[in-house]
Image (tube, grey):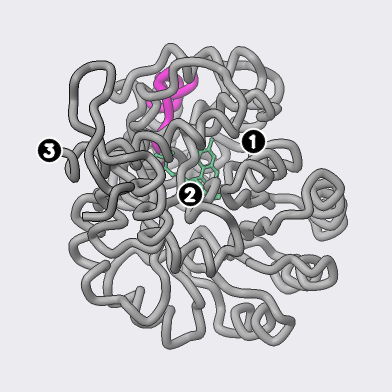
Amino acid sequence: MAMDALPTMTAAGEAAHPPAAARAELDRLMARGAAFLGSRYAVMGGAMSWVSERHLVAALSNAGAFGVIANGAMEPDRLAEEIAGTQALTDKPFGVNLITMHPRLDALVDACLAARVGHIVFAGGIPPGAAIRRAKEGGAKVVCFAPALSLAKRLVRAGADALVIEGSEAGGHIGPVSLNVLAQEILPHVTEVPVFVAGGIGRGEAILAFLEMGAAGVQLGTRFVCANESIAHPRFKHAFIRGAARDAVPTVQLDERFPVIPVRALQNAGTRRFMDHQAAVLARFTAGEVSKEAAQLEIEHFWAGALRRAVIDGDVENGSLMAGQSIGMVTREEPAAAILEELMAQAAAAISARRGG
Ligand SMILES: Cc1cc2nc3c(=O)[nH]c(=O)nc-3n(C[C@H](O)[C@H](O)[C@H](O)COP(=O)(O)O)c2cc1C
């Protein structure tokens, strides 16, 4: 055994692997993901609409993670501004997350390419093949969300350079399957491209576990909302600091004839009113007062602008408090670099503890 690999004792009397060796092992586990992203750590800051703008994105990239701008519903000109604003704050790589159903998807891709953004993350559905090709031909790497193994394989064939698998523990729009299961179903079978895992990750020990299962890296959203650099309203951050895992629940659909895309968020007056709203629309549909299409639209429109109201205006009662189950591990406001450092230290300490034990 090399001297630097000898166990040492911590203040608590626990055997510990020397930090430098544990960090080196962590770096080795993250090497593929970090090389793909061009960042120090294989940690993506999950794009969060309204939250992931230039300040948080640059802070994450400057700290060694990989920030991702959330385009949300922004038009190409606004995106170009946001990219330029981010580039003014960091010379480190960052990505842009585009929602595939945006009506100007091609123009958004072009805005990324014109600004030499290295990575485009397509979210919110399977991206059209043409958009993937456009991004790649323009020199960007393409990252896609894979909700199941068959789709993961299809996306790799379509040209995805990396995948994100996001479990239902995550904040925001979610699929039905937990990361615990998706990781087992997908990681052993997709080795052609790096796979990043997301949903419910709040501590370094979990990051280590997924890396050891074969993930190239991780993506976290909820844990970064309360970074000092995040522009989220103080009331939004306060709700995160107070929130527990059991408070972050998926939206409830009242009637299967009127599907509601599940969104994981903290319960508030808005989520309760959404139930009443669905019931009222259903009653009018049953009475023949509105068509099925109009009723569906009325249900969908309930949340329009609601995330902005909560994140920017601080209306935490009626706005949408999208949050993942890892919310209980958000305990204070602190710099993005400190959050990242804590996660990396926890992962390294877990490595040390095993080697020393
Ligand atoms: C407030 C909020 C907004 C989000 N907005 C988006 C988005 O615009 N596009 C997207 O792909 N994912 C979005 N997400 C998901 C994150 O990118 C990320 O995958 C997720 O937060 C990971 O799970 P975690 O919150 O448990 O860490 C959002 C999540 C939150 C909490």
Q: Residue at x 25, y 68 (%)?
A: 186
Compare residues 342 and 46 and report the one nearer the observer.
342
Q: Is residue 17 above or below residue 125?
A: above
Gap between marks 1 and 3, in whole Å?
A: 41 Å
Q: Residue at x 56, y 24 (%)?
A: 226
* Rendering coords of residue 230 (x, y %): 66, 29
Query: Disc 3 or 2, which lies upstream in sequence?
Result: 2
Mark 1–mark 3 contact, CB under 8 Å?
Answer: no
Label 3: element kind: loop
Specify whether 105 is left or right of 324.
right
Label 2: element kind: loop
Mark 3–mark 2 contact, CB under 8 Å?
Answer: no
Q: Is residue 16 above or below residue 206?
A: above
Q: Which residues are magenta?
A: 263-275
Numbered tag placed on residue 357 in the rendering = 3
Gap between marks 1 and 2, in whole Å?
A: 36 Å
Does ligand 1 reach within 8 Å of label 1's beta carbon?
yes
The amino acid at mark 2 is Ser
The amino acid at mark 1 is Val
Compare residues 146 and 303 and report the one nearer the observer.
146
The amino acid at mark 3 is Gly
Location of mark 1 (residue): 51
Numbered tag placed on residue 291 in the rendering = 2
Answer whether residue 305 is magenta in the image.
Answer: no
Q: Residue at x 12, y 38 (%)?
A: 357
Q: Are there few (<14), some (14-19), or many (20+) residues within 10 Å of tag 1?
A: many
Specify whether 254 is left or right of 32.
left
Answer whether residue 273 is magenta in the image.
Answer: yes
Point out the frontmost of discs 1 and 3: 3
